[in-house]
Image: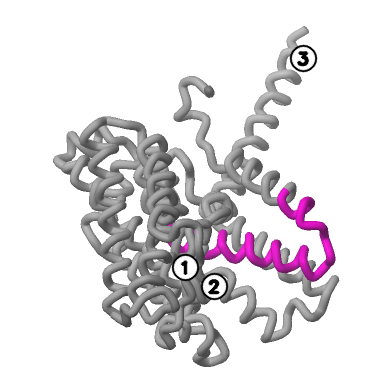
Amino acid sequence: MAVTRDAAAASQTLGTNAAERWRQIRGRLGPWAPVLVLIALCIIVGLINPSFLSVRNMARIANSAAIPLILGLGVTFVIIMGSIDLSMEGVVAFGAVVLSLLVLNGANTYDLGVLAAFIVLMSGAAIGFLNGIIHVGFRIPSFMATLGMWFVGVGVANAILGGVTVRVMDQGIRALALERFLGMPFAVWLALAALLVAYVIQNHTRLGRYMYAIGGGEDLASLSGINVKRCRIAIFTIAGAFYGLGGIIAAAQQGAGFALIGQGRLFTTITAVIVGGTALMGGKGGVLQTLVGVLIVMVLSNGMVLMGISPYVQQIVQGVMIIVAVALSVDRTRLGVVK
């Protein structure tokens, strides 16, 4: 009997040690998992269809990733803070419509050029600021406040245009999509510049440190002297500015402004942010992870198109991807109840 108990104890110890080793390995590889997935995707798709690795196709992927990356930067900040922002499609639609009406266009005589882009950026920031005020001031859950603003933005864009499309004729705006530097459209370089700004905010400002502190535990952050309400409003404002920039590039790529220009971007962006490794519970992740996540989603989408996979199957794959990514990113030890 003693031998049996000793054997059982030894077996349990071995099992515990194996589980501990697995947790250590997972902890080391975890941050690099999205990068490894991206490399594996590129190798697999490249072997199936060699044209995937062509310079022309790489430029196409980079161009398609520009808007999701810019939108993802704003969403990343909000999610790290432990909140969610669903207003991006409304802000993109509103920004694209405003831009199309203020630059040289086929509907009126306005021709504000770069000033119009600045107005759109400020408008996006103002909507983000309003999101933060509603969320913090009225103590409304962020997903409800921003969901309402999503519909407000699209509704205002529809009301302004009455369902029509306004052609953008300003050559400076169109150059973002049509002109290239070192083989890449200007929109790609603008997205990288936005990434650099977001990286500086995240890692080299007090607001960036506070953002992680709030996501890790709002009560502890407040006890540490952080003005949580002010930080939340500031983050939503910055996110709105990124969405406004996304609206500018969307109008440049489409060559027009219309109310449904942001349709479908929310799902792609949230998927990319979560796949990149930013935790929905907050306090973990970053803009570089979002870059990797955006590239994973774009490479997978591009690869499935090259392989002739049906668009319906592509939607299924994206849906499964976000479910798996959320399942892997959620820290269940921080969840008292799953509902």
Pointer 1 or 3: first along the chain = 3
Q: Amino acid at mark 2?
A: Gln
| Side (left or right) of 306 relative to 153 | right
Q: Judge the density around disc 2: few (<14), some (14-19), many (≥20) Cα neighbours within 10 Å.
A: some
Q: Amino acid at mark 1?
A: Gly
User: Label 3 near label 1: C-beta < 8 Å?
Assistant: no
- Residue 209 locus on image (x, y percent): 27, 53
Magenta includes 211? no
- Residue 319 locus on image (x, y percent): 67, 45
Residue hosting label 1:
257
> Which element carries disc 1, helix, strand or loop?
strand
Residue hosting label 3:
3
Residue drawn at x 37%, y 63% as measured from the top left? 244
| Side (left or right) of 47 relative to 158 | right
- Residue 44 locus on image (x, y percent): 79, 67
| Side (left or right) of 141 relative to 126 | right
Magenta includes 305? yes
Query: Which label lies toward us, 3 or 2?
Result: 2
Residue drawn at x 42%, y 46% as measured from the top left? 150
Main SS, magenta region, reads: helix
* Quarter of the picture holding the N terminus: top right
